[in-house]
Image (tube, rainbow, N blue to C red):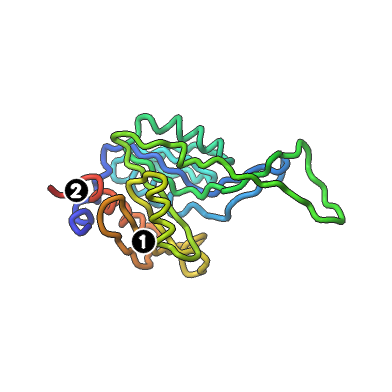
Amino acid sequence: PTGGARNGGNSVAGTRGVVSVGGTGEGMDPVRLVGNCVSGKMGRAWAEGAAARGAEVTLVTTVPADLEGVHEIAVTSAREMLAALQSALPQADILVMAAAVADYAPETAAPSKLHRGKGPLSLTLPPNVDVLQQLAPRDGLFRVGFAAETEELTSRAREKLERKGLDMIVANQVGSPEQGLGSDYNAVTILFAKGAPIEVPRASQGEVAARIRHAMAAARHPAS
């Protein structure tokens, strides 16, 4: 990891990266969504930094930001995100799946606005499409996942890494106002299919994104 950090600053130059960002929103009627409360700051920081270092970056995002040098595709739902990623991935070298895809979605969306009543509103929420599971591994594509957890951080991230056949996963503890969701700061644990984990202490989202790029460089091009 140390060598990767020294040499990985421009390691994305000439590569094609596809990054997913934001929390998906799943329609319950034409004006309401069920989704995840995430800001997309980490994914945007990775995309912006990679583009500045010579990568060709496509950002599939629920929170468009008009980043310089980044091609953005705006989506809302998990299925829209999946379709956009499937279209962008065939020529990609790197997939960074930083989006928080809603795990459940309304079984049906009402065709018109659901109006407030006196009683409770019941929704049936079956499991949503698993976007990352649908993006199968292939030679030449380095797949990075993210895991946001409130407990059992490392064990749950390791299980996700193995279950989805990822090359690397970035795990962060959420539920604290000091870092993570919506914050300008983060702290993460990076785990690999092979190799020892890397602990990244609390730092700005941009610095953490840089450490993630360095870790990817070391994993993609290990020292001989």
x and y percent of residue 130 in the render? 51, 42
x and y percent of residue 200 in the render? 33, 63
The residue to which callout 2 is attached is 222
In-image side of 103 versus 68 (left or right): right
89 lies above or below 53 = above
191 lies above or below 72 = below
The residue to which callout 1 is attached is 189
In-image side of 84 versus 211 (left or right): right
Label 2, secondary structure: give it: loop
Callout 1–callout 2 Cβ contact below 8 Å: no
Q: Earlier in the sequence, mark 1 or mark 2?
A: 1
Quarter holding the N terminus is bottom left
Label 1, secondary structure: give it: strand
Other residues around mark 2 within 10 Å, as few (<14) / some (14–19) / many (≥20): few
Q: Which mark is residue 3?
A: none
State the count of labels: 2
Question: What residue is drawn where x is 37% and y is 52%?
Answer: 169
x and y percent of residue 16 in the render? 33, 36
As shown in the figure, which amino acid type bears the numbered disc 2?
A: Pro
As shown in the figure, which amino acid type bears the numbered disc 1?
A: Thr
Farthest residue to the left: give it. Answer: 224
x and y percent of residue 140 in the render? 29, 35
Question: What residue is drawn where x is 36% and y is 43%?
Answer: 143
Q: Nearer the viewer, residue 204 or 165?
A: 165
Q: Nearer the viewer, residue 127 or 39?
A: 127
Other residues around mark 1 within 10 Å, as few (<14) / some (14–19) / many (≥20): some
**Marks 1/2: CA distance?**
19 Å
Question: What residue is drawn where x is 41% and y is 56%?
Answer: 157
